[in-house]
Image: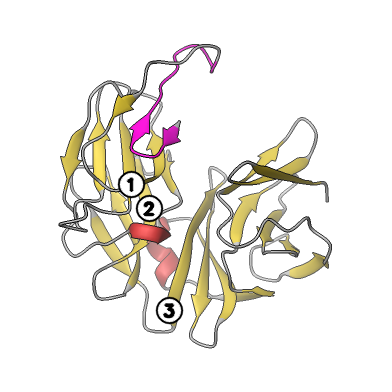
Amino acid sequence: VCDGSTVYTSSDGGVTWSAPISLPDIGDLRSCAGDGAGNWVAFGTGNSSDPTQCCATSADGGATWTLVTITSAAFGFYSYTALYDSVNSQFVAMGIDTDSVIGIYTSPTGSTWTKHAFDSGVIGCSGRLAFDGTHFLAAVQLADSSSAVCIATDPADLVTATRSPTGLDANSPQCVFGADGLSFVFGLYDVASSTDGLTWVVGTSNLPGLGPNQQGVVYDSSTHTFVAMRGTAVARYTP
């Protein structure tokens, strides 16, 4: 669990938690991802004196951390999502570099990263990635300020994949996989759904608004309900 510049770990499914564990100075902590074998990466807004110092890694379940510099990276506000690609055995993140180029970043261990850059047709990203064990979704903002979703089986191919318009506002869309092959993108007040990640239908216009920069949308498979969070506010949506 991420909180500011610290993390908390649990080895019993969340029943009990460790004391706060301080990270190296990577700025304000945005996201963490683990591989299930004790290896973790964490992304922040970047060190105040060096924005490329925006990542930390742990090989002992989060007990100790090592600072990682990602050359030319300035993940900052955009790195809300990091995840582990169990198919290709690598960590994946989406961010923006110091030249304002959006990219997908991949790494087998978190120590060194490879950037896969979008072209200039992509001018923004919310950092939201989704992975269902087979496909990746990435929500991006296009040059005309509309939102689009890219889908691929390899995260590196997201940068050249078809950019399918969602019909939603480009402000902080979030990708989530649901049940029965459906995928969803959440905007501020609307949600779009798709069966193939290429054609999207806006299905509702009355979502409880949490404002921009929602901090996460998760899918509860036991109730087939999506839960969105921002600060201390929570909204639920059942398709």
Q: Which residue is mark 1?
A: 43
Question: As shown in the figure, which amino acid type bears the numbered disc 1?
Answer: Phe
Q: Amino acid at mark 3?
A: Ile
Residue 116 picture quarter? bottom left
In the image shown, does 129 or 18 lie closer to the viewer? 18
Q: Residue at x 41, y 26 (%)?
A: 36
* Element marked by disc 3: strand
The residue pinned by badge 2 equals 93
Whichever of callouts 3 and 2 sits on the residue coming sooner in the sequence is 2
Left or right of 28 in this view: 208: right
**Magenta-colored span:** 2-14
Question: Any mark on residue 102, and which?
Answer: none
Q: Residue under label 3, please give it.
A: 123
Considering the numbered disc 2 on the image, is that residue within a helix, a strand or a loop? strand
Tags 1 and 2 in contact by the CB under 8 Å rule?
A: yes
* Crowd class of label 2 (few under 14; some 14 to 19; many from 20; radius 10 Å): many
Mark 1: few, some, or many residues within 10 Å (few <14, many ≥20)?
Answer: many
